[in-house]
Amino acid sequence: MKKQICTKLQFFMKGLEQRLTDNEDFFKTVDIEFKSGAKTFPARMKYAGPGRLNYSFQGVSVEIAFNELGQKVAKEAENFDQMHLIFSERGTRILVDADNKDVKVKYQDAVEEEAKENNHQASAQIGNREYFIKVGQADGLLKAIGIMTEDGKIKNDMIRKYNQIDRYVELMDGMLKELGEKTGPINILDCGCGKSYLTFVLNFYLKNILKRDCYFIGLDYSKGVIETSKKIAEQLGYRNMDFYQTDIKRYLPDREIDLVISLHACDTATDEALALALRCDSRTIVAVPCCHRELLNQYSFDLLSPIIKHGIFKARLADLLTDGLRSLYLEAKGYKTSVIEYISPLETPKNLMIRAIKVKESNQKALEEFSELKKLLSVEPAVERLTEM
Ligand SMILES: C[S@@+](CC[C@H](N)C(=O)[O-])C[C@H]1O[C@@H](n2cnc3c(N)ncnc32)[C@H](O)[C@@H]1O
């Protein structure tokens, strides 16, 4: 290619170098085809650690720094008639085509392009539900987290999990938009992450679909699930995630947190998640509690004894009181809360979702109501105790 075209190419590649530096966690590959006459010569660059790329061409692999990308490509291009380059990051592709006449740059939605290449209609539908995380668009992710078989089918025994996490994403969509634009990533903390299905799916949705910068922390005290989560992140090439084996109540983040999530964190682990969210002043919180044991043996209310003499009534009322007091305590701490049944009780009876958005410093009226209810019921809810510890 002519010298002046190669200079122009190097100029465009400088822009990609900057993008690579800014979006390092989301970079996937650079695939290049150099052409001379009818012959094609493929080259590939892969991530090789912070600030480094591995460049393979004609059987030779070398490591280069991010800021050598432009020069390397432009220099190589001098020896050929044409070049077609695909710069891939999660969710976006940038195509650079150069020949002796010009250099052209085009942006593509990587999710749609990959679905087309896989010959897939990206319109996952099971029953009447239109999914947010669609078969066809998210196959790599769904396979890695064990929801899809290798030949592209949702596993029968994983349909419930798929429904739950997809609906969670759907209900968070509005909140994510309320977080608005911010400089730097949206920081999300998943408490009691387990194998991190939810966190992986949210990561995909935020970055690949919404194209938002995001960073995830998963916490769980089980070594096994933390190791599995780390492995899946590595397999997917998701570098914007960290997983820690820890008790939720012992953890303090080293950065501002925008959203704390928890899905079926057992018993008072949900309170630990809420307390951590309050301690780190998270802007938003979404919690789906699991089993409740804490208040069952604490609460008493004489007027209701003719009803709660039946164990099942006492247990169900304890569940409602636990989640009601959790929600009221968040209000007292200045959050606007909403509580919904997030999925059909046929999918799981643990289907209540508490959503909270910080709107003011604190709410005196809600705090007084919370204190009065505690007295009336003779309870000491864990959420308060853990927040103030
Ligand atoms: C029912 S699983 C749910 C996992 C995941 N959120 C999901 O929905 O697939 C609950 C997880 O919370 C973890 N857990 C419970 N209490 C915890 C605590 N105090 N600190 C850290 N992890 C906890 C358990 O180890 C378990 O992996």
Image (tube, rainbow, N blue to C red):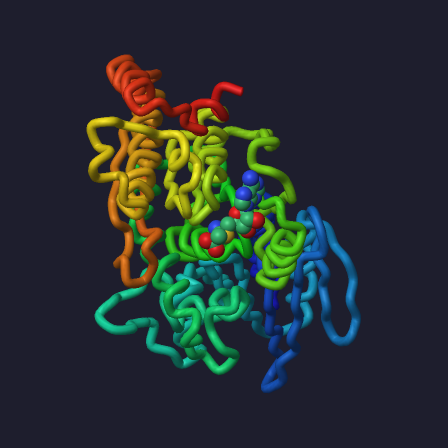
Examine the rendering and report whether any part of residue 352 can be seen. Answer: yes
Q: Quadrant of residue 163?
A: bottom left
Q: Say which of 236 and 159 sits in front.
A: 159
Query: Percent from the top left, x then y, of residue 23?
Result: 55, 47
The answer to whether one can see residue 15 in this image is no
Q: Position of residue 250 (x, y in %)?
A: 61, 31
Given residues 54 and 175, the one toward you in this image is 175
Residue 262 location, quadrant: top left
211 with respect to 386 (left or right): left
Look at the picture and state if 58 lies above or below 270.
below
Left or right, 17 with reference to 351? right
- 333 or 265, nearer to the observer: 265
* Rendered residue at 72%/50% (across/down): 65
x, y percent for residue 26: 55, 52
Query: Which residue is at 63% across, 40% downward?
Result: 246
Total marks shown come to 0
Give the answer, above or below, for where 159 lies relative to 329: below
Q: Residue at x 26, y 18 (%)?
A: 369
Residue 76 lies, in percent from the top left, at 69, 65
- State which quarter of the image contains the N terminus: bottom right
**Residue visible at 38% across and 71% down?**
135
Q: Is residue 310 above or below residue 152?
A: above
On screen, residue 142 above or below 281: below
Q: Quadrant of residue 133?
A: bottom left
